[in-house]
Image (cartoon, helix red, strand yellow):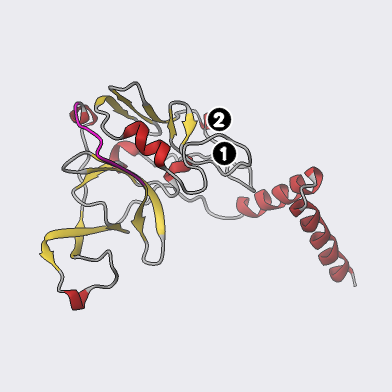
Amino acid sequence: MFESLNRNILLTIKSAADRGNWLAKRLVAHQVRQFLDTLPEQSPIISGPYEIEDFTQPLEESGFDNLMDHYKMVPFEPEQIDAKALKGQQVEMVSCELGSYGIGSYGFFGLFLGENWLIVPIFGAAEWISLDGCMLRETREGASCWIKGGNDQDLERRLQGARVQTAVIGKHHMSVLFDNGAVLEIAQNPKERPKFEGSELPRVFLPGDDLRRSVFLSPSGVITA
C-alpha cells in the first residue's frame, strides 16, 4: 500500500511540474540531482578514437551506407594545434552538428577554415559556446540564443567570411576573436555557462579534461567516434 501511495505522489508531483508548478519543478530537479550524484562523473569531451573520410578512397555507389557516405572512413589521430597558427584563417562554413556515433550526432562545433575544420569535440557543444556574449543554443525557455528552432542562419551570417585575429585555447576555456568583431568563447567560469536543463547542475569540465589536447583540426567534417 505504501509503495503504491509513494508512486501516486511521485506521479502527481511530475504531473504538476509538467504543468509548470514551480514547487513541483524544484522537487523534480532535486530528485534528478540526487540520482545524478550516484552516477560516476563523465567528461563532456568526446575523446575518440575518431574516424574521418579519406578523400583518396571514394566508395563505389553500391557501397554507400547512406547519402553522406562518399568516401571510406579511416582512423584519425588528431594532433595538438597551435592556436596562434589560426590567425588570418577565414571561416567558410559553420556547423553545430558534427561528430556521429552511428545513429545520431554528438553535436560537435566546427568552423571550416578552407582546408581544415576546427573541431570542438564537446557533446552538445552549442550549449557550451557563446558568440558575442550570447549562447549558440539555449534550452531554457525564453533565453536568447543564436540558433532558434534549429535555424542557424544568424550564426552563419555572423561568422561566414570572418577571419581569425586571435585565438586562445586554455585547459577549460577558449576564445576566438574575428576581424568583424565577433567573439566566440567557452567561458572559463562555470557560472557563466548555462546550467543543464532539468538537473540544474553546472556545466563543468572534469579535472583531467584539457581543451588544449582536445580541440583539433580535421580535413573532413564527417567524423565518427
| Residue at image point 79% right, 58% down | 15
Residue drawn where x is 84% and y is 65% of the image: 8
Residue visible at 28% across and 67% down? 67
> Which span of residues is magenta-colored?
88-95
From the image, tell me which residue sits under label 2: 191
Q: Indicate the quadrant containing the N terminus: top left, top right, bottom left or bottom right.
A: bottom right
Q: Is residue 10 above or below residue 182?
A: below
Quadrant of the rendered image containing residue 131:
top left
Q: What label does residue 172 carry, if any? A: none
List x then y, in percent, for residue 136: 46, 38
Which residue is at the far right?
Answer: 1
Mark 2–mark 1 contact, CB under 8 Å?
yes
Judge left or right: residue 187 versus residue 74.
Answer: right
Q: Position of residue 53 (x, y in %)?
A: 20, 59
Q: Nearer the viewer, residue 67 or 77?
A: 67
Amino acid carrying mark 2 in the image: Lys
Q: Which residue is mark 1?
A: 202
